[in-house]
Image: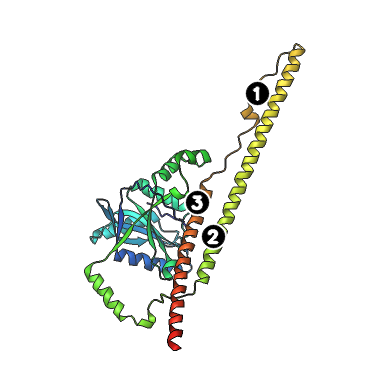
Amino acid sequence: MSKMAGRGGSSRIVENDTPIAYVQMDGLAMMKIIKHCHEESAGNLKMAQGALLGLVVKNRLEITNCFAFPKNSDESMDEEEYQLNMMRRLRRVNVDHFHVGWYQSSDVGNFLNLSLLESQFHYQTSIDESVVVIYDTAKTARGFLTCKAYRLTPQAINMYKEGEFTPEALRNLKVGFESLFVEVPVVVKNSLLTNIMLTEIDEMVPEDEGTKFLDLGTASVLEGQLRSMMDRVDELNQEAIKFNRFQVQVIRQQQDKHRFTLKRAQENAARSAKGEPPLPEEDLSKLFRPIPVPPRLNPMIIAGQISTYSQHISQFCSQSLAKLYITQSLQQAKESANN
């Protein structure tokens, strides 16, 4: 399977018609994803992407290993052949080599776009149980480990199979930005030896070098999220202007058809009064070409991205306010003790 790309916001629906109840990810696969995503992010390169390997056990998708996709700069490499060779080599060393999905990095929830939908559609129609794992590098760097798995809903799959993205088609399929993806719970599982090692490493980390859970520097994060939301709102506004222009053109064309029909009826009435044969009827669809309907898929994706930004901003603000209240109480307690 060729390399899949995509960025852009998540959506959730109540219906969960999926053969996978949850995703169980080994600590090794999780660390490899984290390492790859942060390396790509630190190098100011494009988003990190890779393949997920594992197997399906009843209603549980186990992800036991992964590997990165080759970079776009290497044009001489065949991506599909590269992935097949990687899976063959992993099989030789007795590692799970079954393809069960793919992963990619994101920046504070910015991953939902057309490329992501197309990629997951191809994966999910080829491998029914496949998922896409989204790892958020920016949010994790702020102390919130964010790794989520998503699958396309049956409505979204039917939408792509139909290939029509007109308002009527989306309305009939009952597809909206909130019903594109369904989130699948992710559980990270480590062996007992790994847990022991992590406990020892945690004790070795000095307290002053640990995570600063009470970091109050949230202005830069909120500014970036609000700027991204403003950009998406502008894009949605442009799409709304296009659709409004289409509606005006349709109304104008209907008026032109009506005037043409009345004029032709008057001319035929005048010719009948003179004893002349009526004018031949003309096909209105040839005289007035149907105006193409602008596809509504892109506006729906943008609306989903705005919804995701709103959720992230609301969650981040709630956590920031909680930190402020905690530090306020600590400051008041310190002042009382000094007095």
Q: In which quarter of the image is residue 268?
A: top right
Asked if residue 267 lies left or right of residue 197, the reply is right
Percent x, y for residue 233? 57, 56
Q: Nearer the viewer, mark 3 or mark 2?
A: 2
Q: Which of marks 3 and 1 is in front?
A: 3
Residue 86 visible to an observer of this rendering: yes
Percent x, y for residue 156? 43, 45
The CA span between labels 3 and 1 is: 41 Å
Q: In which quarter of the image is residue 147?
A: bottom left
Of label 3 and label 1, which has the lower sequence position?
A: 1
Asked if residue 9 lies left or right of residue 201, the reply is right
Q: Do the residues labelled 3 and 2 touch (CB within 8 Å)?
A: no
**Label 1 residue SS:** loop
Of label 2 and label 1, which has the lower sequence position?
A: 2
| Numbered label tally | 3
Label of residue 229 in the image: 2
Q: How crowded is mark 1: few (under 14 residues within 10 Å), some or many (20 or more)?
A: few
Q: Determine which residue is flagged by label 1.
A: 282
Of label 3 and label 2, which has the lower sequence position?
A: 2
Who's the residue at 38% across and 81% down the image? Answer: 209
Residue 166 visible to an observer of this rendering: no
Label of residue 301 in the image: 3
The colour scheme applied to this rendered structure is: rainbow
Label of residue 151 in the image: none
* Above/below status of 297 relative to 322: above
- What amino acid is found at the position of numbered circle 3 in the picture? Ile
Q: Quadrant of residue 292?
A: top right
Please tell me which residue lies in front, 223 or 73.
223
Furthest residue to the bottom?
339
The CA span between labels 3 and 2 is: 13 Å
- What amino acid is found at the position of numbered circle 2 in the picture? Met
* Above/below status of 50 relative to 117: below
